[in-house]
Image (cartoon, rainbow, N blue to C red):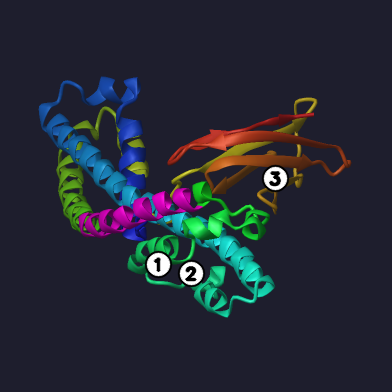
Amino acid sequence: MALNKHQSSHENRGVTLKTFLDSDESKSVYAEYGPFCRGYNSFVANLILFEQEAKNKEKVAAGVATKTDTKNSIANRLGLYLGLTSDYAIVTKNSGLKKMVNYSEYEIIKMNDSDILPFVTGLQKNVFTTELFADAKFITYKVTEILIAALVTDAISFNKNIGTIKEDSNFSSSANDNMNMIIDNMDLDVESMDKTIQFFATDFPEFINGYEKNKALTTTGVRHEGIFGRVTKGGVEQESAEVTIDGKVILTDAEGNYEKYHINGKVSVTVKLLTGESMTKNAEIIWRKMSELNFEF
């Protein structure tokens, strides 16, 4: 449910071109020329619509992740409780109970999503009974009514989330169609600007060069989120310094720069110079943002 390459390249072009044309220097060139402004204003409006639809797709991805985490949590805890109860059944020679609780965490994870709630509530009703919790031998296993009740609550929440994800998946498909339609409109806006920008060819060739550079479509360098920075020692750029991010090592270039894309959240970054000196810093990468983290030794 992430953006595909076609969508990402247009989003990248939209943000890059908007940044260039929003600068005071660019505005001083085209602000008084209506034909170009109309194309640009339409382009920005469509870019805003595109970003909103992208968030709709991201919402679905986040929902799926939350659903998966909840199911794994239920399976992990329930697998433990059933394992303890199985041991109790062996000690008390209760073969019927042992058969009822003979499920592993893996088997629970593999269940259909829609079967999780009935399975959990069935265990609450038929296995984790008042009589079981009152048994002194079972009490020693510390599987309590409160723990089972919390499990049922999570299963109910999980079951509700299933329906939400199904609805959102349809919503995501619609968002995908809308984004592709918006991309077509953005391309038309660029064509309009291509025609009207020739008005500045004689007096502002540098503006046109900048426009052409920033309107280019490319699938390389699409930067949703990530981190970049420069490594220096005493103000001098450090080439080939090792930069370790999330366990992966990259080297700085001749100017001491490093960059890594498609990561987000909290990360730890460690830099090691050729001289052996090292330094570690923490950073938090924000969705669809590039965070800067420099190192000075």
Q: How many badges with numbers are in the image?
A: 3
Q: Position of residue 7 (x, y in %)?
A: 31, 55
- Mark 2 or mark 3: whose residue is earlier in sequence: 2
**Which label was assigned to residue 252?**
3
- Mark 1 or mark 3: whose residue is earlier in sequence: 1
Towards the viewer: 36 or 90? 90
| Label 1, label 3: how far apart the Cα atoms are | 54 Å
**Which label was assigned to residue 108?**
2
Amino acid type assigned to the residue bearing label 3 in the image:
Thr
User: Is residue 198 among what the camera can see?
Assistant: no
Q: Residues within 10 Å of mark 3 (few under 14, many from 20)?
A: many
The answer to whether the residue labelled 1 contacts the one labelled 2, judged by CB atoms less than 8 Å apart, is yes
Q: Which residue is mark 1?
A: 119
Q: Residues within 10 Å of mark 1 (few under 14, many from 20)?
A: some
Stretch of the chain drawn in magenta: 148-171
**In percent of the image, x 47 and y 59: which residue is there?**
129
User: Is residue 235 among what the camera can see?
Assistant: yes
Amino acid type assigned to the residue bearing label 2 in the image:
Ile
